[in-house]
Amino acid sequence: MEFGLKVSKAHGEPEIYPTNYRRNIGCLRYLLHTRPYLAFSVGVASRYMQSRCKSHGEVMKHILWYLKGTSAYGLKFKRGGSKKIIGFSDSSHIIDQDDERGTTKQDTVALSTCEAEFMEATEAARQAIWLQELLREITG
């Protein structure tokens, strides 16, 4: 996604055709198994499947253009290969334009930034465990 892009429900914008948008989201979600670094962008685009506007279509175009330019990239899983995962987490304080929550959509409200960062780190650890189990299943 474009750095610093703010995506919202964009009331007042013309809607786009829903079938193609939903089909593209489904394909992109499937693609996340070999390109997990696209998860944030695809997640943002997925939030607007019910109210797709022109700006959401532009986000989708950016993702698809990126994929077209990087079609030779991806992850290769080999049986008996390395099972080491290195990840990073950033507890951004960017607020969602629509509901004024952080990008992780936490169900609880943090009383301090320290608590919010702890919640973000916990979510990152949960995702890391899930990825480790997925890698173990794929590589045998």
Image (cartoon, rainbow, N blue to C red):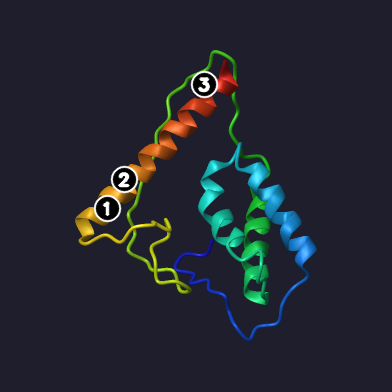
Residue closer to the observer: 3 or 111: 111
- Residue 46, position as x, y percentages in the image: 61, 59
Q: Which structural element holds mark 1? A: helix
Name the mark on residue 121. Answer: 2
Residue 88 shows in the view: no
The three-letter code of the residue at mark 1 reads Glu
Q: If the image is split into quadrants, where does the N terminus sit? A: bottom right
The three-letter code of the residue at mark 2 reads Ala
Q: Which structural element holds mark 2? A: helix
Tell me the distance, in whole angstroms, between the alpha carbons under discs 3 and 1. Answer: 28 Å
Residue where numbered disc 3 is placed: 136
Residue 8 shows in the view: yes
How crowded is the residue under tag 3: few (<14 C-alpha within 10 Å), some, or many (20+)? some
Residue closer to the observer: 72 or 103: 103
Q: If the image is split into quadrants, where does the C terminus sit? A: top right
Cβ atoms under marks 2 and 3 closer than 8 Å: no
On the picture, is 105 further left or further right than 31? left
**Residue at 78% in and 61% down:** 20
Q: Which structural element holds mark 3? A: helix
- Residue 35, position as x, y percentages in the image: 58, 41
How crowded is the residue under tag 2: few (<14 C-alpha within 10 Å), some, or many (20+)? some
The three-letter code of the residue at mark 3 reads Arg
Cβ atoms under marks 2 and 1 closer than 8 Å: yes
**Residue at 52% in and 71% down:** 7
Q: Earlier in the sequence, mark 2 or mark 3?
A: 2
Tell me the distance, in whole angstroms, between the alpha carbons under discs 2 and 3. Answer: 22 Å
